[in-house]
Image (tube, grey):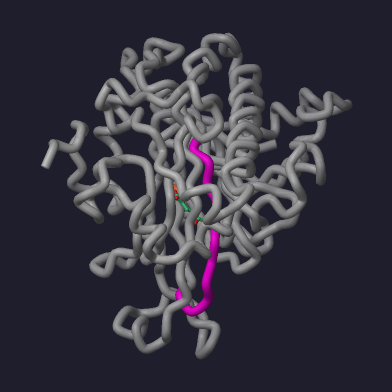
Amino acid sequence: MIAARAIAGSDIQPRRDTMSQTLIPHIDLTPLLANTAGRAETVAAIVDAACDSGFMTIGIAPGQLDLADDIHGRLLRFFELDEDHKQQLARHKFVAANRNVYRGYFPPQDEDPTWKEGIDLGPDIAHPERADNASGDPLREPTPRPPEAALPGWADDIAAYYRAMEALGRVIAGALAEGLGVDRETLLRPFDHGNSTLRLIHYPERRVETLEAMPAVDGEGDARRWLVGVPHCDNGFITLLWQDQVGGLQVRTPAGGWEDVPPRDNALVVNFGRLLADWSSDRIQATEHRIVGGTRSRHSIPFFFEPAVDAHIAAPDAAGDGGYIYGDRLWERMQAFVEFQGLERTPVADA
Ligand SMILES: O=C(O)CCC(=O)C(=O)O
Ligand SMILES: [Fe+2]
């Protein structure tokens, strides 16, 4: 086992940084999901990963989450919608007549190397009672959705997936609480009525000629890859990420290089956000990552497991920052992301 940095204090172990020794552990989640032997070891492995590289992949046996085998493909049917339907779901920033500021569709944006389209879906897709039309707070706004006739069955699939990821988020958060010796309820309570985001992303295939103005990050000839998702740390708590077989997710290594996170069947990538790093007084790592590729279409589905907008987050020890209201801190941090830049946390004014 690798000693966790802050826990081990001066006893910092050298971190691995070669191709043959991966930085990113793979942890079979079965002992936690099915209550089989090995629970304590699994909890310890999760805490080690969180405090060391800040990244892991988790193995989930087929059927364990009670989701259809082809669930990711079903969710990604969203990208088959025609342009008119996508525009109806676009954020106010992109289509002035639309009132949704935070949720909804975002198109690829020319001016940025992050060339992706996607949709952000909030808790009301799985918990209709959480739709808030009254507060005017964009963080709580209802999620715009395509008409059922345009994508039959899709709404049921995203609701099922959202609920499964929320349950999985609670399992990982519960393991962190247990492993770090923090009261489980104290850590999990803010996630009741949580405001998690399910995001569907498509990095469209691009012609080599449109990429060649930028230097490739690696590869030769047809295998060249370019930056298509800029380096960033996630903001929130826990990210549960599915990626397709194309690959291209890379994680910053301690030596300053990048390590690929190869696609893996029956697994999700898990990483941690800056608010959880703050909460743990930097014992848990919010590690930088980026996406490379360009000439092949790629899809990914992150689920950002997040507390309620008005949850008060108190750091568990005095070294923390004294606590904050989740929604306020999230909004402040979000402004660094291209898809959120320039947004105001106010309702759209009547035209
Ligand atoms: O596309 C991916 O694999 C990761 C996307 C990501 O890092 C993010 O949306 O925060
Ligand atoms: Fe990310």
**Magenta stretch in the rendered image:** 294-304
Q: Say whether residue 54 is visible.
A: no
Q: Position of residue 61 (x, y in %)?
A: 81, 43
User: What x and y, as percent, mark residue 311?
Assistant: 39, 16
Q: Quadrant of the N terminus?
A: top right
Extreme left residue here? 351
Q: Is residue 284 magenta?
A: no
Q: Please identify the dominant SS of the magenta region.
A: strand
52 left or right of 119 in image: right
Rendered residue at 59%/65% (across/down): 247
Q: Is residue 302 magenta?
A: yes
- The x, y position of residue 64, in whole percent, is 79, 37
Going 28% across and 36% down the picture, which residue do you hit? 333
Number of marks drawn: 0
| Picture residue at 75% right of the left edge, 50% below the top | 266
Q: Is residue 231 above or below residue 294?
A: above
Give left or right: position of 292 versus 62. left
- The one of 33 and 224 positioned closer to us in this rendering: 33
Instruction: State which quarter of the image contains the C terminus.
Output: top left
Q: Nearer the viewer, residue 248 or 121?
A: 121
The answer to which quarter of the image holds residue 271 is top right
Q: Is residue 318 left or right of residue 189?
A: left
Q: Which residue is most to the front?
A: 149
Which picture quadrant has residue 46? top right
**Residue 18 vertical placement versus 345 (above, below):** below
- Determine if residue 24 is in view: yes
The answer to which of 316 and 209 lies nearer the viewer is: 209
Q: Residue at x 59, y 18 (%)?
A: 177
Q: In the image, residue 27 lies at what x, y percent? A: 73, 41
Q: Nearer the viewer, residue 172 or 129?
A: 129
